Image: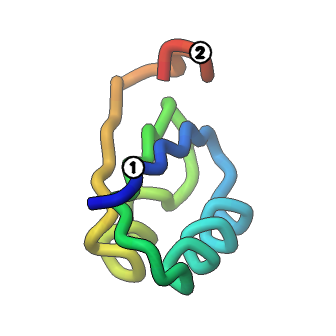
Amino acid sequence: MDATVVIPTVTAGERLRRALTSLACQTAAHQVIVVDNGGRDATRTMLAREFPSAVRLAPGRNVGFSRA
């Protein structure tokens, strides 16, 4: 593993999809962690279906980007 990318997100479905698609095209080994920061969109479903290797952390409420 060369890099770990942490993406805090809250209700940013399409922007998150574009970011993860871009990361999937990278050749350097990396791990992706998505902090689902209390959003009310389909982030969980999208990650499971389209980006199963991404790790999803869900604090259960919006803790803000700095804590995420």
> Dot 1: what SS?
strand
Task: Identify the amino acid type marked 1.
Answer: Thr
* Mark 1 nearby-residue class (10 Å; few <14, some 14–19, many ≥20): few
Q: Nearer the viewer, residue 34 or 22?
A: 22
Closer to viewer: mark 2 or mark 1: 1
> Dot 2: what SS?
loop
Which residue does the image show at 30% across and 71% down from the upper left? 48
Which residue does the image show at 27% across and 70% down from the upper left? 53
Mark 2–mark 1 distance (CA, rounded to whole Å): 17 Å
Direction from residue 51 to residue 1 in the image, left or right: left
Q: State how many labels appear.
A: 2
Residue 49 horizontal/vertical position (percent)? 34, 80
Earlier-in-chain disc, 2 versus 1: 1
Q: Which residue is mark 1?
A: 4
Q: Which quarter of the figure has residue 39?
A: top right
Q: Reply above or below: 22 against 31.
A: below
Q: Nearer the viewer, residue 68 or 45?
A: 68
Which residue does the image show at 41% across and 81% down from the upper left? 50
Q: Which residue is mark 2?
A: 66
Task: Identify the amino acid type marked 2.
Answer: Ser
Q: Reply above or below: 46 against 66.
A: below
State the mark number for residue 49. none
Q: Reply above or below: 33 against 32.
A: above
